[in-house]
Amino acid sequence: MCADRTDPDQPYVDTSAKVADEVKATTCYMCACRCGIKVYLRDGTVRYIEGNLDHPVNGGVLCGKGSAGIMQQYSPARLRSPLLRVGERGKGEFKEITWDEAMEIATDWLGDVRNEDPRRLAFFTGRDQSQSLTGFWAMQYGTPNFAAHGGFCSVNMAAAGLYTFGGAFWEFGDPDWEHTRYFMMFGVAEDHASNPIKRGIGKLKGKGGKFVSINPVRTGYSAVADEWVGIKPGTDGLFVGALIHELLKARKIDLDYLVRYTNAPWLVIQDKGAEDDGLFARDKQGNPLAFDKKKKKLVSAMLPDISPALVGEFKLADGRKAVPSLKLLADRFLSKQYAPESVAAKTGIPAETIKRLAAELAHAAFEEEVVLDVPWTDWAGRKHDKMIGRPVSMHAMRGISAHSNGFHTCRLIHILQILLGSIDCPGGFRYKPPYPKQAPPWLKPTGRKKEVAPREPLGGPHLGFPESPEDLLLDDDGLPIRIDKAFSWDAPLAAHGLMHMVITNAALGDPYPIDVLFMYMANMGWNSSMNVPDTLKYLTEKDAETGEYKIPKFIYADSYFSETVAYADLILPDTTYLERWDCISLLDRPISEADGPADSIRQPVVQPDRDVRPFQEVLIDLGGRLGLPEFTNTDGSPRYPGGYPDYIVNHERKPGLGPLAGWRGRNGKEIGTGETNPKQLEKYIENDCFWFHELEPNQKYFKHANADYLEFAVKMGFRVEPRPTIFQLYLEPMQTFRLAADGHGKIVPPARHRKRIKAFFDPLPFWYGPFEDTATDQSEFPLHAITQRPMHMYHSWGSQNAWLRQITAANRLYIHHDLGKKLKVEDDDWVWISSHIGRVRCQVKLMDGVNPDTVWTWNAIGKRQRAWMLDEDAPESNQGFLLNHLIAELLPARSDGYRYSNSDPVTGQAAWYDLKVNIEKADGKDIHETSPLFEPVERPFAADIPEVLRFGAQFRRGGSTGRRAE
Amino acid sequence: MTSLPKSTGKKLGLVIDLDICVGCQGCVTSCKEWNTGGYSAPLTDEDPYGADPHGAWLNRVHGYEVGEGAEGRTVHFPRSCLHCDTPDCVTVCPTGASYKREEDGIVLVNPDTCIGCKLCSWACPYGAREYDYDDGVMKKCTLCVDRIYNENLDPRDRVPACVRACPTGARHFGDLGDPESEVSQLVRDRGGYDLLPEMGYRPVNKYLPPREARDVSSAVLIDEPATTKNEKTSAADRFFAWADQVLSR
Amino acid sequence: MHPAYSVILFTTASGAGYGLLALLSIAGLLNLVPLDPWLGFTGFLVSYAFITIGLLSSTFHLGHPERAWRAFSQWRTSWLSREGVMAIATYVPTGMFALGWFFDWTGGWVWALLGWLGVVFSIVTVYCTGMIYASLKTIRQWHMPQVAPLYVLLAAATGAVLLNLLLTVFGDARPWSFWTAIVLLASAMLFKMQYWVAAETDSKSHTAGRATGLGRFGKVRAFEPPHSTPNFVMREMGHRVGRKHARTLRTLAVVFGFAIPIAASAMLLLSSPLPSWLWATVATVSGAIGILIERWLFFAEAQHVVTLFYGEQEA
Ligand SMILES: Nc1nc2c(c(=O)[nH]1)N[C@H]1C(S)=C(S)[C@@H](COP(=O)(O)OP(=O)(O)OC[C@H]3O[C@@H](n4cnc5c(=O)[nH]c(N)nc54)[C@H](O)[C@@H]3O)O[C@H]1N2
Ligand SMILES: Nc1nc2c(c(=O)[nH]1)N[C@H]1C(S)=C(S)[C@@H](COP(=O)(O)OP(=O)(O)OC[C@H]3O[C@@H](n4cnc5c(=O)[nH]c(N)nc54)[C@H](O)[C@@H]3O)O[C@H]1N2
Ligand code: SF4
Ligand code: SF4
Ligand code: SF4
Ligand code: SF4
Ligand code: SF4
Ligand SMILES: [Mo]
């Protein structure tokens, strides 16, 4: 390449140096986004990881975490062999044991419980990407106590979305980055769609669309937003309500869209005190009724060609009154309560700004219409020659989700989108298949008494979407069946369980004690728990009489020496993500794109050099040893002797429906459903470990009502019938709970829950103050405290990464300049931050771009001393801190002594960001440590921790690894 | 060698779009992983798991707050070698290890002849050179000279690692000496600028400024139509009347 | 700038060495001292010791001292290379001149030529040292016309102090050499003080706003640093001594580096009951302390423009 070089002195550079012996495709797991990667290998070592240009998720790009995968692969904190606790819990004293021993112990412990009372196993998984396997295993085992981390993560988003329009923000949909003109983002720092959002924002801004970020903090995405709205935490419901107010007032809503796709015209019975008050009026077949203005009579609202009334009051056959649900909605949001002037003070957003934003939304939606010349057919067979879109899109995540009012707030955002007519239209928010589902999906939780029995599998899936109190999991006394109290009156629509309550509930024996706690990939002894000090207490507390731990046995599967390892009794060490098979399935949290369904696998690209086993293999092996029906053949031999790859290819949930949708059928030509294909994994590997099916242009939008898409969805097994999804402005299931609280129906809440159910099961969304605001003294704890995810760290597991930790090794508490002035503190000064349960000492950093009543920090940077194989004086443990120590998992006791979990009353979503705090300057000179500093954890094994890391030296010319020599 | 070439065939460099950089550090770690095993191998890290971890990196991203209040903004700012046209980091080098390539203008350090005197790092105003304490030589952005021409890589991958990785598309690579190149056009269209032009180093890399805040003062507000606004009925009733009317059409 | 001890030792020791070398040569050439072989031997030995220790110490901070020879190649552009070349080159004429002195081959024009050449070479070498710093546009406090001449003047002044010590020990001390030291020290002191004033009043022309190009949007404040623990750039270029601290150190540098040596040299002019070598020793020791402080400050007070990216407002 250097032929034109004229200077003979210029050194020769080998511009075509050899890069790799081999390049293998797989899927990234430096976070849950699951981008496609190519791993360059030299001499069996990872030389380089790059994004796969052809992959639907990332299109080749790679984020800060993904590019640091090498250091995760070669981290000294990797567990090396199974461990059995020998010292006291929490001390970190273990002995290394063999896999045979480990499997025997686990089989023993789990077998005993299964034979007696399967409820006494609580199996909860964290950053699990194999929930379809782990959930299935738990079903086969027969315990009702299974869930993944969704309950403390984002169930508000999932539930609000799925109940309202059969999809969700989260990772079930995306803005139409190609066409959107106006993008409003609520409370997102990073999200599961990490790279897709970044790519999208780049694209949107490149095309001149406007990006508005609603967020108390101006960093990350908010930094590149065209407009940043520094809202006060927990008040988005008011803000969105005010936007709706303005749009309704100005008539800037898409009435046609409402008629076509929503339950706006459905008639709601108005009969105070009646057992069906507030439910939809229905015909004999159970169809909801509407009033047809042309025919001037009540008709089934499900009929295609009616002219339903959206306003007015109508008489039902039995003489009672009913009104279209839109009327109730409009009544609520046109009221003064939601006028911009009324919400300005509480939200911290000036009324003029709200009005202007409403106007901008209306302008983009109605004046900048996007028209695609693509004919399509709707569910009723009506042909449309164009796809007309309102190019307004929205996205929201934990800033909304992690509040105790998150379910309703999220519903409000969806309703705003629906009023603008912007769901799954060009330029709007688009579903990713297998979404949309029905709203809510037709899936009920399983676990009632008759469904749980020793040595029997559970009759159905653990998690689902209750539509009435009858779907709750309650015992005869109305008490929770599940250890986490999901689907009980505490959290009726807890579609993802309440993982954050498991340890507390089990230790307190409320609702009952357990024998074995089995966890996978969740650092519950640290950053994923609320109230870390008490969680550690619960894990180590013993029964005064028996001297046994209150949680007698704790099995934990991790890949690394995390804080939680020290608290478990039996450690099952997992591989790294580059060493195992994985399956990112449509039955799980899929990686699909709006343009079509996709799934993917991981294949081992390097061999483990330690005595570790992929957890999925271990689970399948345990299934065989325990004799779980679907994991054993009739002769008792294991069903999947080939381990996880065997399961991925050969397991069928229903005939023809397996973990992977691509290359099914004996010939490998079928998609979605089809016979198993022994060559399926080979096909995936040939295609860089993913499968993506691009929808036809006429299937790509209006999927909730698009005949061609719906038929496809049925064929794929996504939906049962090609019936449309109807957007639920008015959410009838909520009303059934309200009615129960009034004493109607077979299942009614005990007296102590009634007021709460009545208050929060409003079928129309509304705003109420986050619980910690009302439960604590606002003058004592005047400030909001929240966290954000740093883009380059994934929760706790980034700190062991020699590269990532150089970028952030300690966090600060970020506060507004004005607050700094008031407290007389400057950058790096130490302060005490206290909540109603404790206090933490940390350093501050002053900034401008934060809501003045809010303080924040990066999530999960603080570490326990010596965990993750960091030195005892690492900044992570000595200056870094966790806000989790201050976040209570239980709300303060009510007058009757009962303590609800610190969660959303509808879904049980953990209310991390409700936290209220006070800050004081820390006295004393020479403070250089955070507080509390827990005792350092002992390392369970002697790791090889280099003082100087020369990674890559082995690849340089000549390959010498020492200091560069002449 | 430390004499600068009179002119370079091309002026390869980066154009960095501050308007869309979200500070994800993708370019930072992808640069590190490529280069720690590439031309500059290794990029050593000292005390990697201890109290004072630090190592040689060729690209870093700063976060700034600019202005205050309503005028305030947060800007993420990636910083690597700008492959200056007339940089003193080359001319101060006593050994010739630091040089500017005649064919494409890339500024490189020859790791086999560098004596590690650090003078070039003193001469660089941009903090782009990082000394590898263990390896005893200076490290700097190579513009991925071992990627962009590498015949062992897929042609689509023959771009710098940081450009290939950047999720938002904030990094562009090309010939800034060719006024017709995409990067040159981008610089023209978006007002790309030099860092510290008064230094006289004539950086090849350019930065695209964050876009000016949009003018919102002229926004046309929406309101209830004047025709109904003053009717004595409730706002909800007026809304219903409108909805009824629209749907009867 | 981080004050590396090897570099401080290098510049001060070799500076004094070249100063002594040049002054001794001049004294010999002008017959201001007896051309005593042992005086010459000792004088040149001490000069070479200072020079060589300095040069060697400069290689301590190299990552690859074994490659140091490569540093002679780039004299066309690099002041460091020039310094290296000149440093080595200076050994040649001065060495031959020294040999002539020792073996009494003095008197011829060749010897004189070698002598004057050595003087010029010594000055040029020190000038080159100064130019290493003065040529850096990135450091305002260095990129000043005073810096290279100051290096030369300080070398001469410290050389003169050494020369006095040498002459007093050999009992060959003369008022001219005391006067030389006093004049050189005093002018170096004044020059250095003028430099300090100039460095402080010189308007800082670079700002964070210009460095980042973001000044157009308002004041630029560092928010999230790219790394939590200092990297090389911060370790090397982020070091800055506090203002108050710097004031005290400057006073100490003036007192020890100039005031006391001047006073001690003045004592040599007066008839003091103490032996003159003692005063010369006081001047030398005090001067050494002062000059080391001066040189430490030269680095520690210097602000590199790169600090603008790391939170400084101006440089
Ligand atoms: N203050 C505060 N706390 C929070 C949040 C917040 O916003 N603020 N967010 C909450 C949310 S939404 C979540 S999801 C949780 C997340 O919290 P966690 O679920 O605890 O997530 P991590 O800390 O990333 O990792 C969990 C464990 O997985 C292990 N691990 C990593 N890779 C593997 C692997 O390949 N196999 C196995 N078996 N283990 C592996 C890690 O070592 C680690 O111990 O945190 C919650 N906690
Ligand atoms: N890099 C990285 N990526 C991740 C993770 C990670 O740890 N690191 N974790 C993954 C996981 S498990 C999850 S759950 C997702 C979560 O992804 P995000 O939803 O992006 O989660 P957070 O970082 O908690 O960001 C919440 C944002 O909401 C803002 N916020 C807080 N309260 C409010 C409020 O009341 N209103 C509004 N409007 N905003 C508010 C905060 O300032 C913050 O910017 O990210 C996933 N992706
Ligand atoms: S977003 Fe980053 S860490 Fe997450 S999967 Fe993609 S590349 Fe990996
Ligand atoms: S940025 Fe610095 S290192 Fe790069 S060419 Fe310019 S002066 Fe040299
Ligand atoms: S450190 Fe190396 S490249 Fe830099 S000036 Fe010294 S010899 Fe040249
Ligand atoms: S061009 Fe290459 S070496 Fe330079 S910053 Fe980008 S990745 Fe690093
Ligand atoms: S990868 Fe792109 S978006 Fe991320 S920090 Fe670098 S330039 Fe910015
Ligand atoms: Mo999460």
Image (spheres, coloured by chain):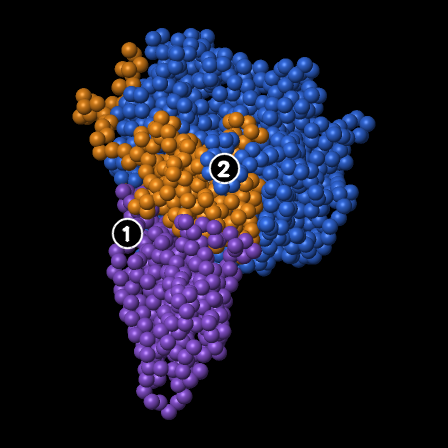
Chain colours: A blue, B orange, C purple
Residue A648 horizontal/vertical position (percent): 67, 27
The spot of residue A706 in percent (x, y) is: 47, 14
Q: Residue at x 21, y 31 (%)?
A: B218
The reply to whether residue B169 is visible in this rendering is yes
Relative side of A600 to A258, left or right: right
Q: Which residue is mark 2?
A: B144
Q: Position of residue A679 (x, y in %)?
A: 69, 21
Specify the subunit that label 2 lies on: B
Q: Residue at x 49, y 56 (%)?
A: A879
A755 in relation to C195, above or below? above
In the picture as drawn, the residue positioned furthest to the right comes out as A635
Please name the amino acid that badge 1 sits on.
Answer: Ser
The reply to the same-chain question for discs 2 and 1 is no
Q: Which residue is mark 1?
A: C205
Q: Mark 1, chain letter? A: C
Q: Is residue B90 above or below residue A766?
A: below
The image position of residue B191, as x and y in percent, is 30, 34
Going by the numbered disc 2, the residue's amino acid type is Cys
Of residues A922 and C45, the one drawn nearer to the viewer in this rendering: C45
Query: Which residue is located at x 69 percent, y 31 percent?
Result: A644
Q: Is mark 2 within 8 Å of ligand 6?
A: yes
Residue A884 left/right relative to B122: right
